[in-house]
Image (cartoon, rainbow, N blue to C red):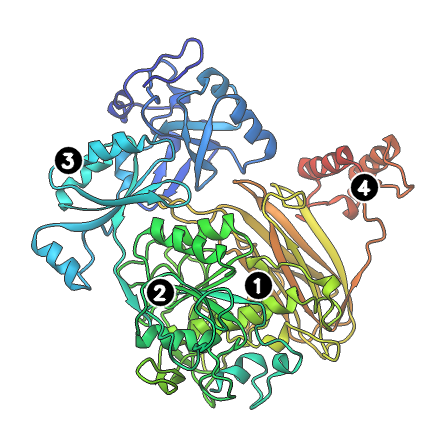
């Protein structure tokens, strides 16, 4: 199959490019020339640069390319690449993309001064470093190993011809495809094969990645008041009428015993009218782990005892655990279609720490379905594993139960392979009493992160009801204020509520993350000493951010009696399994206070400190001031690099605060005369030349082109 090329550019074999790897090339990348991949760093400034070797004919008709830019993506750059016939696939750090050049005009591409490198996507980049090296954790995998085979997932490029690729895979000796399906961005093939076949598979142009098939393991009441108030017997959300009504959780686990009193409905069959189970997408059965998890999240036997879960008036939809990314994505989608916006998972793959297809699937689903929050129990081993290392999922560890709720009970320590903070949040999971599958109405105590994750899921359901019932912003239920919160807002709300677990050294940390959930800190009511301020912006919406955009709001802090807590979270574009790090879009949080400037995630002694540098890796950033001085504070969100789409975000602010109405809500009307005209530009340029601080629109303490770019963009858009 031939693609179209620009005049003077000819299509030939890609392998001609690989054969000249030793040739010197011009360094045209201005020190940007590194690809940070799972396979290792690759110096693009001196390797196989098509732009520097125009005489070499390259064939991208059958093969995927890599394009690197001199900085972050912008809307104008994206349009220019599209006009040149380039189809971008996933982002690769730094500032690069896998790309389809079959219909590209290479002359037009070479003329783009921000494109600094074009080369081949190499076969060696397609292999997971632990391929075939993970010990068997099940009899099925051990049986394969005894036959000299391994179980794998083979991911294809989005432009692959599936039928042709499956035929090519089948022709490789020892390769057996078991199933294939859509995993959100591409086709994924589940298969068995000898390890020796890996090189031949990687050589197929349509293949992008080969990894081990996940080996899933399970991650084996006082919790109700601990997660709400941490005051024995005090459940303020229940008192205000928030008990999970109208909410549905999606559970993938061992089979729930539907005849246990925590779930039983003696009148209605499973379905829309069942009091507990909206859908059961598997054959019926009874499993101790799944029944316990379901009971902790939403169980209710109509008695205030250990058969009652956190969100005890919510319902559930159920399916069994999936080990393939395509089936996992499909089951998440099914649960979403059945009304679940919160999804809890008390299982994982203890065989790897890679950001692989399973972790990526969580990010794909969360990014594409922004109203959802996917929750995962972290491993009970000492080191963080997978897929809790996703970016958009919420990773949960287990604290002790009363009186030891400030102590760590179970949960692997981070960071992730690429340095992100996980786990993020804790709930009680030590000797948790919940529904017993072997009885009709009995309970049993289990310990593990498996028990903490459904407690966080129940907390998320309560937080979601807070917003859907219209408690924000007045603190009392008002249907006119009802809205559907994004999953990022639920995550930010839960994390903003957290408290330091004093039994764990350091805060925040890679051991306890942001600490233990305490809902009363975020979900404020009309009689609360705190106030809540939020923003909830969807990805690719009119208010979403592009590179160099700046969002700013001001608040008044009225006293130091309440901590000031500012939490920013966003559902990032899915990472590339070939890349390390997995981060794609970078937003930066800054709080400008009377006492100085505080950047997100810069901490000392458990509170924010001035100085430091912006965090370019995590998609959760926080500023905490334990005793903030009264005065006016400015909250800034700077879109430092938005490399895919336009980035939404959720912002949660709590404390003894109120929002300050902006004196001039439209920056384009710079002179505030009610008109957008030449005089606004004239005044802005005069102040900019004089380096007036007001013209530092992106808050980087410099007066440069980016500030002009922001103003002119806003000026062109005009005022409402």
Indicate the position of residue 134 as horizontal and vertical percent values: 20, 57
Q: Earlier in the sequence, mark 4 or mark 2?
A: 2
Residue denoted by label 2: 384
Indicate the position of residue 506 as horizontal and vertical percent values: 48, 74
- Front residue (pair 115, 452): 452
Would residue 529 appear left or right of 253 to someone viewing this image? right
Indicate the position of residue 373 as horizontal and vertical percent values: 50, 60
Residue 15 is drawn in which quadrant?
Answer: top left
Q: Earlier in the sequence, mark 1 or mark 4?
A: 1
Q: Earlier in the sequence, mark 3 or mark 1?
A: 3
- Front residue (pair 514, 180): 180
Q: Are the residues at dot 1 and dot 4 in contact (C-beta closer than 8 Å)? A: no
Indicate the position of residue 439 as horizontal and vertical percent values: 33, 85
Q: Are the residues at dot 1 and dot 2 in contact (C-beta closer than 8 Å)? A: no
Residue denoted by label 1: 490
Q: Residues within 10 Å of mark 4 (few under 14, many from 20)?
A: few
Q: Is residue 136 above or below residue 588?
A: below
Residue 352 is drawn in which quadrant?
Answer: bottom left
Quarter of the rendering occupied by the C terminus: top right
Would residue 512 appear left or right of 135 to someone viewing this image? right
Task: Residue at the far top: name it.
Answer: 8
Would residue 617 appear left or right of 186 to someone viewing this image? right
Which residue is depicted at the point 57% across and 90% down?
A: 233
Q: Are the residues at dot 3 and dot 1 in contact (C-beta closer than 8 Å)? A: no
Q: What secondary structure is marked by label 4?
A: loop
Which residue is depicted at the point 76% across and 32% down?
A: 716
Whether residue 162 is visible here, answered yes or no, is: yes
Q: Residues within 10 Å of mark 2 (few under 14, many from 20)?
A: many
Spatial CA span between label 3 and label 1: 47 Å
């Amino acid at each position: 199959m031939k693609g179209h090329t620009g005049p003077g550019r000819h299509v030939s074999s890609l392998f001609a490019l690989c054969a000249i790897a030793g040739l010197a090339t011009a360094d045209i990348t201005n020190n940007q020339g590194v690809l940070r991949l799972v396979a290792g760093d690759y110096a693009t400034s001196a390797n196989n640069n098509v732009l520097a070797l125009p005489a070499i004919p390259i064939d991208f008709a059958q093969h995927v390319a890599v394009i690197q830019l001199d900085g972050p993506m912008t809307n104008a750059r994206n349009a220019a690449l599209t006009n040149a016939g380039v189809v971008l696939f996933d982002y690769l750090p730094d500032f690069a993309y896998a790309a389809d050049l079959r219909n590209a005009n290479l002359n037009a591409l070479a003329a783009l001064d921000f494109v600094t490198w074009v080369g081949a996507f190499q076969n060696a980049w397609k292999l997971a470093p632990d391929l075939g090296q993970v010990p068997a954790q099940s009899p099925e995998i051990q049986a394969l190993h005894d036959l000299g085979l391994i179980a794998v997932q083979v991911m294809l490029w989005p432009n692959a011809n599936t039928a042709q690729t499956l035929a090519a895979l089948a022709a490789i000796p020892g390769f057996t495809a078991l199933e294939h399906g859509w995993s959100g961005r591409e086709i994924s093939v589940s298969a068995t094969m000898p390890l020796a076949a890996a090189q031949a598979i990687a050589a197929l142009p349509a293949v992008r990645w080969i990894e081990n098939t996940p080996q899933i393991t399970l991650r084996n009441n006082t919790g109700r008041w601990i997660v709400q108030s941490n005051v024995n017997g005090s459940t303020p959300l229940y008192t205000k009428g928030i008990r999970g009504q109208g909410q549905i959780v999606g559970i993938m686990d061992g089979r729930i015993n539907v005849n246990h009193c925590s779930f039983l409905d003696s009148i209605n069959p499973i379905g829309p009218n069942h009091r507990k189970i909206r859908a059961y997408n598997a054959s019926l059965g009874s499993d101790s782990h799944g029944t316990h998890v379901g009971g902790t999240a939403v169980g209710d036997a109509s008695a205030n005892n250990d058969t009652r879960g956190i969100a005890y008036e919510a319902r559930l939809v159920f399916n069994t655990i999936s080990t393939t990314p395509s089936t996992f994505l499909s089951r998440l989608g099914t649960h979403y279609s059945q009304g679940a916006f919160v999804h809890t998972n008390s299982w994982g793959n203890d065989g790897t720490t890679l950001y692989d297809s399973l972790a990526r699937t969580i990010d794909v689903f969360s990014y594409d379905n922004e109203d959802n929050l996917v929750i995962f129990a972290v491993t009970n081993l000492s080191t963080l594993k997978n897929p809790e290392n996703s970016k958009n999922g919420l990773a949960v560890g287990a604290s002790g139960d009363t009186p030891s709720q400030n102590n760590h009970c179970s949960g692997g320590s981070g960071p992730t392979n690429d340095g992100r903070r996980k786990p993020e949040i804790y709930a009680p999971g030590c000797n948790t009493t919940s529904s017993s599958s072997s009885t009709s109405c009995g309970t049993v105590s289990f310990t593990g992160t498996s028990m903490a994750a459904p407690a966080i899921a129940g907390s998320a359901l309560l937080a979601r009801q807070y917003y859907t019932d219209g408690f924000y912003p007045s603190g009392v239920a008002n249907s006119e204020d009802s809205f559907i919160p994004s999953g990022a807002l639920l995550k930010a709300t839960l994390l903003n509520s957290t408290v330091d677990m004093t039994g764990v050294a350091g805060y925040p940390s890679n051991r306890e993350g942001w600490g233990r959930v305490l809902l009363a800190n975020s979900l404020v009511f009309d009689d609360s000493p705190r106030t809540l301020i939020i923003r909830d912006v969807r990805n690719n919406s009119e208010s979403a951010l592009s590179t160099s955009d700046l969002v700013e709001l001001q608040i008044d802090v009225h006293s130091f009696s309440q901590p000031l807590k500012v939490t920013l979270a966003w559902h990032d574009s899915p990472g590339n399994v070939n890349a390390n790090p997995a981060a794609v879009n970078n937003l930066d949080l800054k709080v400008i206070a009377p006492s100085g400037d505080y950047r997100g995630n810069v901490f000392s002694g458990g509170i924010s400190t001035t100085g430091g540098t912006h965090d370019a890796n995590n998609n959760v950033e926080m500023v905490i001031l334990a005793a903030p001085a009264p005065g006016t504070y400015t909250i800034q969100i700077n879109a430092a690099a938005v490399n895919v789409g336009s980035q939404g975000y959720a912002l949660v602010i709590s404390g003894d605060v109120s929002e300050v109405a902006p004196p001039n809500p439209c920056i384009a009307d710079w002179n505030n005369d009610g008109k957008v005209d030449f005089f606004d530009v004239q005044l802005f340029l005069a102040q900019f030349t004089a380096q007036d601080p007001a013209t530092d629109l992106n808050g980087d303490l410099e007066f440069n082109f980016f500030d002009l770019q922001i103003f002119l963009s806003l000026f062109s858009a005009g005022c409402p």
